[in-house]
Image (cartoon, rainbow, N blue to C red):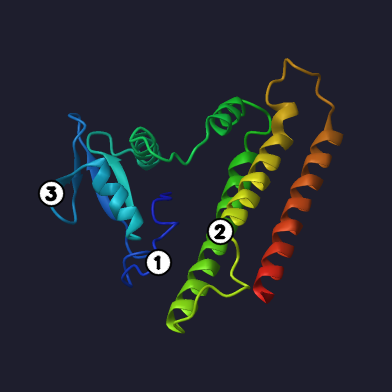
Amino acid sequence: MSMAGNAAAPGAPAGEAGGTPVVVKKYANRRLYNTEASSYVTLDDLAKMIRQGRDFVVYDAKTGDDITRSVLTQIIVEEESKGGQNLLPTTFLRQLIGYYGDNLQGLVPRYLEFAMAAFGRQQDQMRRTMEQTMGGFMPFPASFPNLEEMGKQNMAMMERAMSLFAPFARRDEAPSGGPGEVDALKAEVEALRRELAALRQTRGKA
């Protein structure tokens, strides 16, 4: 299942985001072929498609295997290697690597999807506020959320969530506490969900 179009860029033409995914084939020479445009493309081209809200799937031209996840990972590596402001802090990457093979590995992707969805909703709210402000030819209203503060809150919430898994990241550091630890972890995740809900409700009234 492709995740390429889940974060469609705002303003994407109707029918592109959520339509039939573009089929891209990867050949043995590592070249990528866009079957819709009948032309070869690069990872940068695929990144632009994602920003435009275009969904795609990538298949190995020889085996027919779906290698979309692998290609998306390559795009992230390419973007991170360009320098400037990186999206993935080193600490986060170390923590993420530590969860591979752990008994709680399956819980991490679900939380990350939840956190990114919440962040996306906040971005939409800020965008709507910006449009309303510019449409009224007014300076930023007092109720407009502080962007830097919102970024700090998002990062703090993500770090707190990742720290919940830290005691379990390496099995050799401490003996397993059994089901009780898992229940406590679920309670913490539920608390985070309530915080997010309260935060959205508060900003919705602003």
Q: To which residue does mark 3 refer?
A: 39
Image quadrant where one finds the C terminus: bottom right
Dot 3 lies on which element?
A: strand
Residue at position x 53%, y 67% in the image = 126
Q: Mark 3 vs mark 2: which is more N-terminal?
A: 3
Mark identifier at residue 147: 2
Foreground: disc 3 or disc 2: 2
User: Disc 2 marks which amino acid?
Assistant: Leu
> Where residue 200 sits in the image (x, y, percent)?
67, 66
Q: Measuring 45% from the left and 76% from the top, which residue is drawn there?
A: 131
- Numbered label attached to residue 76: none
Give the Cα distance between marks 2 and 1.
Answer: 19 Å
Tag nearer the camera, 2 or 1: 2
Q: Quadrant of residue 181?
A: top right
Point out the tag, 2 or 1, that comes first from the N-terminus. Answer: 1
Q: Position of residue 153 (x, y in %)?
A: 65, 51
Q: CA distance from mark 3 to mark 2?
A: 40 Å
Could you tell whether 23 is left or right of 179 in the image?
left
Q: Identify the residue under disc 1.
A: 10
Q: Which residue is located at x 18 percent, y 36 percent?
A: 31
Name the spot of residue 23 as percent of width and height, x first. 26, 51
Closer to the chain start, of discs 1 and 3, is 1
Say if residue 55 shows up in the picture. Answer: no
Circle 1 or circle 3, nearest the eye: 1
Q: Secondary structure at mark 2?
A: helix
- Whether residue 161 appears in this view of the structure is yes
* Identity of the residue drawn at 81% across and 47% down: 187
Name which residue type carries label 1.
Pro
